[in-house]
Image: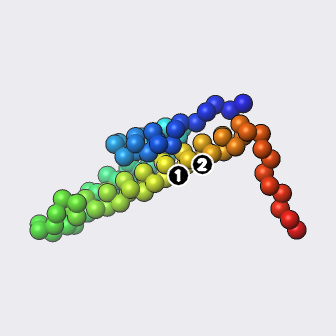
Amino acid sequence: MRVKPANPHLVLLSALLLPGSGQVWNHEPLRGLIFLFFLLLLGGFTLLTAGPDVSFVGRFAGGFFVWAMAVFDAYKRARIRFELWRHAQTGAQPPQRQL
């Protein structure tokens, strides 16, 4: 019997609050670190290239984009792990393909 994975909703909440933490909950800390690196890199790039009249969100648009992708990635992977675990607990066999 495998260990129960983290609740996908808690992973989602964690990823929303702290970028990269959702990947850590999914036992993929290197993936979270990579997301965090690119968040800082693209956020800094858009900060340096944005004009003086651009809003706060516009100045850090690259970082916000990577953050959104990290949240989506963490939740999706947590949900897949949880559903695979739940399916394995029921003992159900996958459907057979018809040829």
53 sits left or right of 89 in the view: left
Q: Quick check: marks 1 and 2 in contact, CB under 8 Å?
A: yes
Front residue of 24/51: it is 24
**Dividing the picture into quarters, in which one does residue 46 lie?**
bottom left
Measuring 35% from the left and 60% from the top, which residue is drawn there? 65
The colouring scheme, among rainbow, by chain, secondary structure or one colour, is rainbow
C-alpha distance separating marks 1 and 2: 6 Å
- Establish if 16 lies above or below 53: above
Measuring 22% from the left and 60% from the top, which residue is drawn there? 57
Q: Amino acid at mark 2?
A: Ile
- Establish if 32 lies above or below 68: above
61 sits left or right of 38 in the view: left
The residue wearing badge 1 is 76
44 sits left or right of 28 in the view: left
Residue 78 position within the rendered picture, expressed as x and y whole percent measured from the top left:
54, 45
Residue 42 position within the rendered picture, expressed as x and y whole percent measured from the top left:
32, 59
Residue 80: mark: 2
Residue 47 position within the rendered picture, expressed as x and y whole percent measured from the top left:
22, 60
Residue 89: mark: none
Measuring 80% from the left and 55% from the top, which residue is drawn there? 95
67 sits left or right of 73 in the view: left
Measuring 49% from the left and 49% from the top, which residue is drawn there? 75
Disc 2 packing (10 Å; few <14; some 14–19; many ≥20)? few
Image quarter hosting the N terminus: top right
Front residue of 2/19: it is 2
